[in-house]
Image (tube, rainbow, N blue to C red):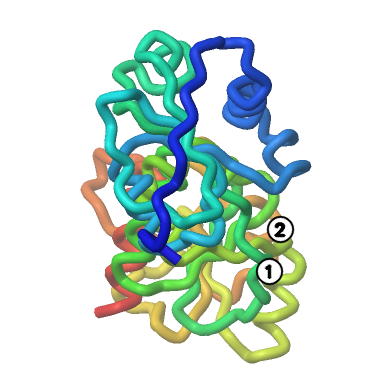
Amino acid sequence: MLGAKAVIRQRITSRKNPKLQELRRLLTSRSQREAEGIFVADGTKLLAEAVRWIPQQLLTVVVTSAVDPGPLPEHVRLLEVPDDVMAQLSPMQTPQGALFTCAYPAAQKECLSPGTLVLDGIQDPGNLGTILRTADAWDRPVIITPGCADVYSHKTVRASMGAVFRTPPVFSTQEAVVAACRTQGIPLLVTALTKDAVDLRCAALREAVVVIGSEGHGVGEYFLTQADQTVIIPMASRCESLNAAVAATVVLWQMVC
């Protein structure tokens, strides 16, 4: 419950404080985040999004004296640190004066449906976050397969602009995605430059599951060999490819048209 009782603000001045050291480990280590089931995000806007969408997952909030975090859930631990400690702790070049931790969401049940976007080897957290943000805007489900960047790194969360709070993606293997498509009779399409690729405007993306590949290598071999159809985004012949997030945006838009 928000605002029923003011959260006590505890001041910390030592950079060696165990809680701050824990935050550093969570910021820098994916394995640590996954082991503890906790991730870190930064910024006042993201904090407001977390309070709005996942208040029960919010655990600890760290702010500078100038920042008012607003009403917080009663269970949240609120810490205040000096500006120099925040500067040393925050991953941002210009800190906004707020960091916070959240518990991972409960595992989402894998439920494949037409109009789903599958990400295969998206390794840039900025691209991954942008794709999640765009999919959230058009209410399209996203499946993350092994080899993608960490959804809960601070870079991905920031690039998603809170989309990971509102519509957390589902995690699955490539094999499980293909098996689900076969069982449910959903066409599996991949974006790739092949001889038999068709213009995506001529493909029924709304009724299909579509795979977007990595920035450098495209869709992996497994999905390529299992796909029912390959689609391409038409572009000028002088251009070789699009950024993964841009390509995903075009696919998502075509899905909802």
Q: Where is residue 82 in the image (x, y as percent from the top left)?
A: 39, 14
- Crowdedness near tag 1: few (<14), some (14–19) or many (≥20) residues, C-alpha within 10 Å: some
Choose between 196 and 63: the one closer to the eye: 63
Kind of residue at badge 1 = Gln
**Of the numbered discs in the image, which one, if any, rests on residue 100?**
none
Dots 2 and 1: beta carbons under 8 Å? yes
- Residue 93: quarter of image: top left
Q: Tell me the quarter of the image containing the C terminus.
A: bottom left
Question: Label 2, on which residue?
Answer: 222
Residue at 65 percent across and 81 percent down: it is: 181
Q: Tell me the quarter of the image containing the N terminus.
A: bottom left
Describe the element under mark 1 as helix, strand or loop. helix
Residue 131 in sight from this viewpoint: no
Residue at 30 percent across and 66 percent down: it is: 137
Residue 167 in sight from this viewpoint: yes
Kind of residue at badge 2 = Tyr
**Of the numbered discs in the image, which one, if any, rests on residue 226?**
1
Choose between 231 and 30: the one closer to the eye: 30
- Crowdedness near tag 2: few (<14), some (14–19) or many (≥20) residues, C-alpha within 10 Å: few
Q: Position of residue 35 (x, y in %)?
A: 77, 42
Describe the element under mark 2 as helix, strand or loop. helix
- Give the CA distance from mark 2 to mark 1: 6 Å
Up/down of 36 relative to 82, above or below:
below
Up/down of 226 relative to 214, above or below:
below
Choose between 81 and 229: the one closer to the eye: 81
Residue at 45 percent across and 86 percent down: it is: 207
Q: Position of residue 171 (x, y in %)?
A: 65, 61
Residue furthest left as drawn? 236
Up/down of 225 relative to 69, above or below:
below
